[in-house]
Amino acid sequence: MDLSRAERKLDHIRHALGHERDVYNHFDDIDIVHQSFTSLNFDKLHLTTHVGELNLSSPIFVNAMTGGGGEQTLNINKDLARAASETGISMAVGSQMAAIKDPAERPSYQVVRQENPNGIVFANVGSEATLNQALTAVDMVDANGLQIHLNTLQELIMPEGDRDFSTRLNNIQDIVSSIDLPVIVKEVGYGMSKEAIRHLHSIGVRYIDVGGRGGTNFSKVENMRRQRPFASFDNWGIPTTFSLLEARNVRKELDLHVLGSGGIRHGLDGAKALVLGASSFGMAGTLLKILLEQGYDQLIDEIHHIHKEIKIVMMLTDSAKVSELSESPYVLYGKLKEWESQRV
Ligand code: FNR
């Protein structure tokens, strides 16, 4: 294993978890309307739901983070996968591009399937991946779906990042039309506009993870590694709730499954994403930080706690199923309200 690559991976994780979070949190700009009467029994509520053709026992998924890079990343993925299996949540592996090119990098991805043989696992590639590379990624973890990440700004800020994005839409189109599994196109923390979503839909994409701003911020992460940072882009991007409103607007006309992620801190944020129309929500930085700083048992405890928080919101909105949350009334404030009035 190339040691400097392993160190770079860990450094990246440290920066991703350690950077300063925004003081303003867009999830605070939405309130779900409380309903005093409920017809439900908390102990009989279940969290099963579906995203298109995927049947899930929980609306939570561990979003793509790591893999490759040595023993520590292998252990992180092993623990995340065990936790996913124990709590019934889905999990995406980190970008598999290096492992597609070098089989020595594969064990830390394959461990995710070994630890969770019956769970829902998503493969992950960048939009530079060709169809063959995407198939290798799916095969590597026997995936139930494939995430393709879009991270233009991150690449542009990275000194060694990609500069030519001219073939990417063709790659996505090729993959979506050839792979017979859900293909989820995701952002990594900059959010998706309705224009981007429509464009992706026009080339066949039916699953979108809006991946909005508000949590892990790759401009800040990459700027830490630059001598001359592009700090002016630290606040670039569409916050998750704003992006969910964009997606909700587009979904009125298009056949589309929306997932929400980016800056989800707890179950109430997750429930707000579901109320705004996401059928599932992803958490990356929050869960990894708990695992690394507090350990495996605390991570399990946290996921159970998030499940309870979602059930409490179901009680308080009289939603018998997770999917009914999207019919709950809500009120928007501040920047989120302004965004809605100008954009959707
Ligand atoms: C990520 N993310 C990510 N996304 C992706 O599609 N492929 C990847 O390889 C990675 N790698 C990665 C590493 C680390 C350490 C973190 C914290 C995150 C992005 C991740 O899936 C998610 O989109 C963002 O982190 C936003 O969600 P949170 O962290 O705010 O919940």
Image: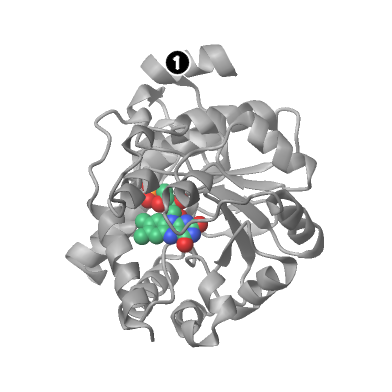
Give the quarter of the image for residue 301: bottom left
Q: Identify the residue at the far right of this view.
A: 177
| Residue 235 to residue 93: above or below | above
Is residue 314 or residue 184 the one in the foreground?
A: 184
Is residue 171 or residue 257 the one in the foreground?
A: 171
In the drawing, does residue 21 fall left or right of residue 150? left
Residue 45 appearing in the image: no
| Residue 267 to residue 326: above or below | below
The residue drawn where x is 44% and y is 80% is: 108
| Residue 107 to residue 175: above or below | below
Q: Position of residue 266 (x, y in %)?
A: 32, 45
Q: Where is residue 154 in the image (x, y as percent from the top left)?
A: 45, 49
In the drawing, does residue 244 fall left or right of residue 208? left
**Which quarter holds ligand 1?**
bottom left
Q: Position of residue 83 (x, y in %)?
A: 37, 70
Is residue 183 or residue 37 the one in the foreground?
A: 183
The residue tagged 1 is 337
The residue drawn where x is 67% and y is 68% is: 134
Q: Which amino acid does label 1 sit on?
A: Lys
Q: In which quarter of the image is the N terminus?
A: bottom left
Q: What element carries label 1?
A: helix
